[in-house]
């Protein structure tokens, strides 16, 4: 492997169960001390040490393109495909880029951001990146109560109130590695721009 330096929850009757499982979930998943202690592997097999992201504003989501293009030097967008939500990402890692290009969104789409290997964001196999982010930002700022619209979609275990509810939840990290804000799936990505600009004003470059 190469190493690269670039690169409406059913609240009443499920809420209590989720709270009881929170402690178990934390105990079963490694949580890094800082954002810069994290590491992840890209679709191409490159291992990325998050220490190289120091001084950058970082936005983490499934798929995004336009904001990375607008702020190419000081904003880093990281994409993490996940198949835990309606099994919508059932491609193998080596098929994902072709799927983006020809199927969804299609039309020759070429990501301008780093896409990592498909991973779990909830349950016992939670990727360390999301274990850390959910620990620091337990709920989306704009929707602190929802998890899943239908309990049949909860295909992971254990369930926690801090779980990512669906594709397109977003996490924004400041230039010193501090998790700044979490946004629900319903929050339009483009509306994050004022927060990004606020954090960019804190960058040194």
Image (tube, rainbow, N blue to C red):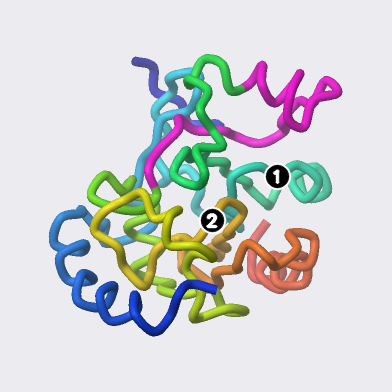
Apparent side of residue 156 relative to residue 174 in the rendered image (left or right): left
Dividing the picture into quarters, in which one does residue 24 lie?
bottom left
Please tell me whether residue 58 belongs to the stretch shown in magenta: no
Please provide percent x and percent y for residue 119: 40, 38
Q: Quick one: 44 or 166, which is closer to the camera?
A: 166
Q: Quick one: 113 or 186, which is closer to the camera?
A: 186
Apparent side of residue 171 relative to residue 65 in the rendered image (left or right): left
First of labels 1, 2 by sequence position? 1
What secondary structure is the magenta-colored segment mainly?
loop
Q: Which mark is residue 166?
A: 2
Which image quarter holds the C terminus? bottom right
Q: Is residue 157 above or below residue 82?
A: below
* Whether label 1 touches label 2, CB < 8 Å: no
Number of the front mark, 1 or 2: 2
Residue extending farthest bottom: 12
Q: Provide the residue span drawn in magenta.
A: 97-120
Would you call the spot at circle 2 few (<14 residues within 10 Å), some (14-19), or many (20 or more)?
A: some
Q: Which mark is residue 64?
A: 1
The residue sitting at 79% across, 25% down in the picture is 106
Please tell me whether residue 118 belongs to the stretch shown in magenta: yes
Which image quarter holds the N terminus? top left
């Amino acid at each position: 492997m190469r190493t690269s330096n670039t690169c409406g929850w059913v609240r009443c009757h499920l809420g209590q169960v989720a709270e009881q499982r929170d402690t178990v979930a934390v105990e079963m998943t490694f949580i890094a001390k800082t954002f810069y202690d994290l590491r992840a592997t890209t679709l191409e097999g490159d291992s990325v040490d998050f220490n190289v992201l120091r001084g950058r504003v970082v936005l983490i989501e499934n798929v995004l393109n336009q904001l990375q293009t607008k702020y190419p030097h000081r904003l880093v967008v990281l994409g993490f495909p996940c198949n835990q939500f309606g099994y919508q990402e059932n491609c193998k890692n080596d098929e994902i880029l072709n799927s983006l290009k020809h199927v969804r969104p299609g039309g020759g789409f070429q990501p301008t951001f780093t896409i990592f290997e498909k991973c779990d964001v909830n349950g016992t196999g939670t990727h360390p990146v999301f274990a850390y982010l959910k620990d620091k930002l337990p709920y989306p700022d704009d929707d602190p109560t929802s998890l899943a619209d239908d309990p049949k979609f909860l295909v992971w275990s254990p369930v926690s109130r801090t779980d990512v509810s669906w594709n397109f939840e977003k996490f924004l990290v400041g230039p010193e590695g501090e998790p700044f804000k979490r946004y629900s799936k319903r929050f339009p990505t483009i509306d994050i721009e004022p927060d990004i600009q606020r954090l960019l004003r804190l960058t040194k470059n």
